[in-house]
Image: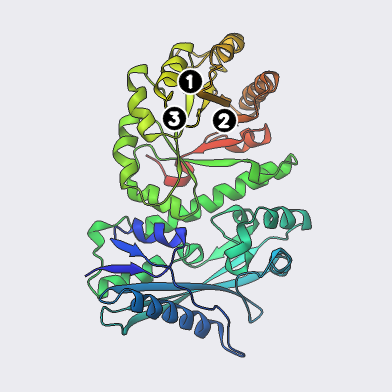
Amino acid sequence: MSLVLGSASPRRVALLGALGVEFAVQASDIPEVAAPGEPADAFASRLAREKGLAVARLRPGHWVLAADTVVVVDGDILGKPADAADARAMLQRLSARRHEVLTAAALIAADGALADEVVVRSAVTFRELAEAEIAAYVAGGEPADKAGAYAIQGGAAAFVAQVDGSMTNIIGLPMDEVAAMLRRHGLWTPARAVSREAMSDIAASIAAVRARIAAAAQRVGRDPAAVRLIAVSKTKSAAQVSAAIAAGVKDVGENYVQEAIAKRPAVDGAASWHLIGHLQRNKVAKALETFDCVHTVDSAALGETLARQVAQRAAPLPIFVEVNIGGEASKHGVAPRDLPALLGALRDPHLSVRGLMTVPPPGDALTTRAFFRHLRQLAETAGLAELSMGMTDDFEVAVEEGSTMVRVGRAIFGVR
């Protein structure tokens, strides 16, 4: 039996893909307007059914899964905002409030009849939001097509004080219930999937990390949106990476070229892939088949090899220069005193030096802060805007010291 997902939402596509289900995507075009007095659960269910039936007419002979999400506060339904002013008004209303997120899913059989449906409720509590952060979030464009004008797997993770219930339901599909529905009708078997509990854990961990990034940024007057989260997936499965992407991750970091080559084709969802481990010159060609950015350039020879390999590309390769900020013999990276010479050697039209990267020596927060501050000063002197620094144990300190990319693995995926 073949399955069609009646939605073009990247979040729903990636979540369903993480289950190991094979499906096609077909967007529906259904007006999303509640009838006067229509209860929220009835409204969400009706939209899911109407979307599913509309797609079934376009794809006869296929099973169709369709879903719709609404936000409810004080009994009022908040759908997608009409414009920026409407989005601001919704977020102002949700500030410091507990509200419900309802997702309805409908399964249409190959004969075009409704086969199954479910409505799942989760509760979200926002902390009090400042007008400036609401304005900044709305200006970024993320609320435009989101029920209630926010996406918990995006920048709005920093707004959340508490979540009760299914995390994947808030992201876009209640995976426990959807998996059970598909299993009842022979469309899914657990042996092909990453654990649904693990998917929810990953989503919750990402939301928690984003909230910690936002809090650290706000402590020093920075915009949290200026910090990119790289999910480091060393030794983790393609399904786990797919679950992270479904939860809003847009950047994936891998330490080893061969592992990434094997993993990336099996991952569902779009993301930029960053090489954050040491790169040997004889693996450059293979690395460039998989990675979009290299964080560990530490010699003129490696830079020359990269430039030669990307010479036929339309755009230069984004790179970071790795600095051995603590002078450790066991680590790669250029010594701070040799950084200006290396930056000069890397001036090539096929390379785009975005910033500096480092892994500081282990130590307490005070010591680590000093190393991060030193790297920031080196970048400022060199006129570089980006800093790739901070991992699970120290990313908050790194954000306070100016990091623009934090590389977090354990706090997202758990202990290796």
Residue 75 at x, y percent in the picture: 63, 82
Q: In what quadrant of the picture does the N terminus appear?
A: bottom left
Kindly identify the amino acid type of the residue bearing the numbered disc 1: Val
Residue 59 shown left or right of residue 220 in the figure:
left
Mark 1 lies on residue = 297
Q: Is residue 337 above or below residue 26?
A: above
Residue 123 at x, y percent in the picture: 56, 70
Kindly identify the amino acid type of the residue bearing the numbered disc 2: Met
Distance from disc 3 to disc 2, alpha carbons, whole Å, reads: 28 Å
Q: Residue at x 59, y 61 (%)?
A: 162
Q: Residue at x 41, y 22 (%)?
A: 278
Task: First in sequence, mark 1 or 2: give its number.
Answer: 1
Mark 2 lies on residue = 389
Residue 250 shown left or right of residue 264 in the figure:
right
Element type where label 3 sits in the image: loop
Distance from disc 1 to disc 2, alpha carbons, whole Å, reads: 14 Å
Label 3 CA crowd tier, 10 Å (few <14, some 14–19, many 20+):
few
- Note whether residue 359 is visible: no
